[in-house]
Image (cartoon, grey):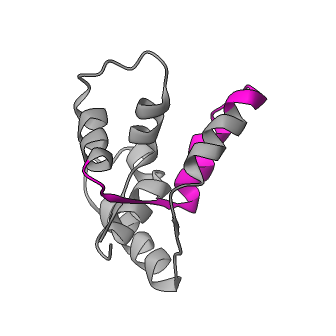
Amino acid sequence: MGVVVDTSVWSLALRRGTPPEDPQVGKFSAILNEGGDVVLLGVVLQEVLQGIRRRADFDKVRSHLEAFPLLSLDRYDYLTAAELRNLCASRAGSTQAQLTARSRRLVCVTATRC
């Protein structure tokens, strides 16, 4: 069974100066230390790497991320993510940020099959 890690957690874990007591990074570190199988989604890989400006840092992070398998998505994943978006949009109080969080819905959908 694999663990799908969201972009925000990867970003915190890879960021210099992140406090070690950060609960998300702590849980992620524990999973890795216990030998947990962490998998990447292509959209998460892209989001993590596109936020890195310096080429040397980009290459270093890319090299580290190559150790994690990339989870393939299929039509069902995208259809289910679209249904989740529409369900959120039908609820009163949904913000634009919640409605445009495409990668978050893909993480939710694929996490159910890991």
**Residue 62 among magenta residues:** no
Residue 35 among those drawn in magenta:
yes
Q: Residue furthest right?
A: 55
Q: Residue 30: give x, y in percent of width and height.
A: 24, 42
Q: Report the quarter where the N terminus lies.
A: bottom left
Q: Quadrant of the C terminus?
A: bottom left
For the residue pair 25 and 88, the one nearer the viewer reads as 25
Vertical order, 49 against 83 (above or below)? above
Query: Measured from the top left, where is residue 20 in percent x and y?
Result: 29, 22
Count up the numbered dots. Answer: 0
Which picture quadrant has residue 82? bottom left
Nearest to the observer: residue 74 or residue 114? 114
Q: Is residue 96 above or below residue 74?
A: above
Give the percent coordinates (x, y) of residue 48: 57, 42
Magenta segment range? Answer: 34-57
What residue is at 42 percent from the left and 70 percent from the top?
81
Q: Nearer the viewer, residue 39 or 81?
A: 39
Percent position (x, y) of residue 29? 30, 39
Give the residue at x 47% y 35%. Answer: 11
Answer with left or right where residue 114 lies relative to residue 27: right
**In the shown orientation, is residue 113 left or right of residue 55?**
left
Residue drawn at the location 49% of the way across and 19% of the way down? 16
Q: Decide if residue 40 is on the left or right side of residue 55.
A: left
Relative to 67, 8 lies left or right: left
Query: In the displayed structure, would residue 41 be above or below residue 62?
Result: below
